[in-house]
Image (cartoon, rainbow, N blue to C red):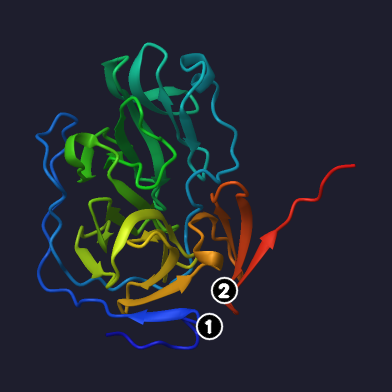
Amino acid sequence: MGSITFGAWRWLGPALALLTACAPLATPEPPLSPSATAPARRATATLATIAPTRNPPTATPAFTATPEPPGWIAAHCALPDSSSVSPTGAWAAADCHDISAQLLVGTNDGVVWTIGGEPLSVRQVLRRRPLLWSADGRYLYFTQTVHRPGDDANAFAAVGSVHRLTLASGDTVEIVRSVNNLPAFSVAVDSGGARLAFLQSDAPERVTVIDLESYAPLKIALGVVIAAAGDLTWSPDGDRLLLSAVLADGRGTLIMIEPATQTILALATPEDRVMRILAWPPGELLALRDEAWPAPGAWTLHLATGAFLRQIAEEQP
């Protein structure tokens, strides 16, 4: 079991419970072969040791890039489901459903790669969403998920398979495969684009962290019974993960994970509320939201003290 240091867990307080995580046991396997129609099977990552970096992030997280989207997105997609521009502005991607389901990836000059192109269906919606541009400018990571009628596209664990597109060649590699591409995972890529973490919705007792250079996976047991896995988020400097979850008895909790030491800490939320993680910016404040009916609200968690502060909206005169 990893030890707790003041620098890593400054907000440790009486509300925290120390849990035990398992050590890695085996060796990695190579990335899965790319296939949008591959036979259904579960992700088969085995255990391996990873030495996560503690260096400051070297890339801007996905969906925070400031460059303007190129004109071809509007020309090809009247209402794209999602779009993203690389931090340098050299590449952009858009999930289009005007005629068929396809992910368009291109430069400022136009579309370079078209992924998919399946006919639209009234029984299901196939979404391919940009996840993160790699720091070295070589790759785009994207998710591929089939949503059927009745699915909540914004619910916890709402991501299917995860793929990597090589921008120079158009080759794709399937990193994580879900069962029939069903929305089965909570997924997060660190801001440096070095590691991908995911949690299976039907196996929420552990988090898997994959080194995106060697594809060596590390499985970290959470040591707590979880009924539903929620948002999974990396810290700005990439040394910790935070998971929002629902315990087996219905109580909400936040679980802090340090991959380097496999240290797990569970933090009780105010009145056991189920929280969503909105943002983890640099600094001491973490933005949260609880969805409790009839009065959902926004919260701030002070990481140095462990204190929750609810943001009360003032009524207009």
Distance in Å between CA atoms under marks 2 and 1: 7 Å
The reply to whether dot 2 and dot 1 touch (C-beta < 8 Å) is yes
In the rendered image, the quadrant that contains the C terminus is top right
Vertical arrangement, residue 24 with respect to residue 120, above or below: below
Q: Where residue 149 is drawn, which disc sits there?
A: none
Q: Quadrant of residue 94?
A: top left
Q: Name the residue under label 1.
A: 10
| Residue name at image x 60 percent, y 33 percent | 68
Q: In x, y percent, where is residue 30?
A: 12, 53
Vertical arrangement, residue 270 with respect to residue 18, above or below: above
Q: Is residue 104 left or right of residue 26?
A: right
| Residue name at image x 39 percent, y 35 percent | 129
Q: In x, y percent, where is residue 83?
A: 48, 32
Vertical arrangement, residue 40 with respect to residue 156, above or below: above
Could you say whether the residue bearing mark 1 is in a helix, strand or loop?
loop
Q: Name the residue under label 2.
A: 303
**Nearer-the-camera pick, 208 or 92:** 208
